[in-house]
Amino acid sequence: MLIKKLDAPRDMQIGARFETKKHGYVTVIEYYNTHTVIVAFENTGNIRSITAAKLRSGQVSDRSVPPQSSMVGEKLESVKHGVLTVVQVESENIVVLENEAGEEIRMLLPAVQKLRDRIEDESEIAKPEMPTSLSALTKRNKKTKDVNSLLKKMLTDYGK
């Protein structure tokens, strides 16, 4: 079955560049329809098909790049070394980091993930407490009840 090519919208013309959230820029190679857009990653040269909506929002991932490489550029805080920036992920479990002074520091991947988890835990603590049940979500305060009862009384007394 051949896919019928449609005229591309202005932002999806061949050669258009889009920024992805984690893997740099992609260039549109071919546009078939809103469900099938062929793109090439500029940094790796890999080619992949994606929907136009995901392309516009930047939700395109390069499947040939290992997931650890998405950590590159991420800033972490260490008690011993201060603020660290991930520079590179070597082999399977060695991460090269750089501190503010420009010194290179090597850590094992589990240690870096522990630093990342600590940052995530701190951000979760700062979030306000959300309702945990449906009844807690639908509870009304006294003022709302008073206004509703007053309104109800007005409507029943109307016309008497």
Image (cartoon, grey):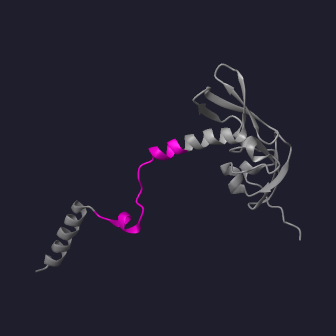
Q: Position of residue 66 (x, y in %)?
A: 79, 46
The residue located at (16%, 73%) in the rendering is 153
Q: Is residue 23 visible?
A: no
Q: Position of residue 140 (x, y in %)?
A: 29, 64
Of all residues shown, which one is farthest toward the bottom? 160
Nearest the eye: 72 or 154: 72
Q: Can you tell which quarter of the image residue 142 is in?
A: bottom left
Q: Can you tell which quarter of the image residue 88 is in?
A: top right
The residue located at (84%, 65%) in the rendering is 4
**53 sits to left or right of 93:** left
Nearest the eye: 48 or 35: 48
The residue located at (75%, 62%) in the rendering is 35
The residue located at (64%, 29%) in the rendering is 84
Report the magenta residues as a range: 121-140
Q: Position of residue 149 (x, y in %)?
A: 19, 70
In this rendering, is residue 96 above or below 143? above
Nearest the eye: 154 or 7: 154
- Quarter containing the N terminus: bottom right
In this rendering, is residue 32 above or below 25? below
Of all residues shown, which one is farthest toward the left? 160
**38 sits to left or right of 99:** right
Q: Is residue 100 visible?
A: yes
Of all residues shown, which one is farthest toward the top? 101
Of all residues shown, which one is farthest toward the right? 1
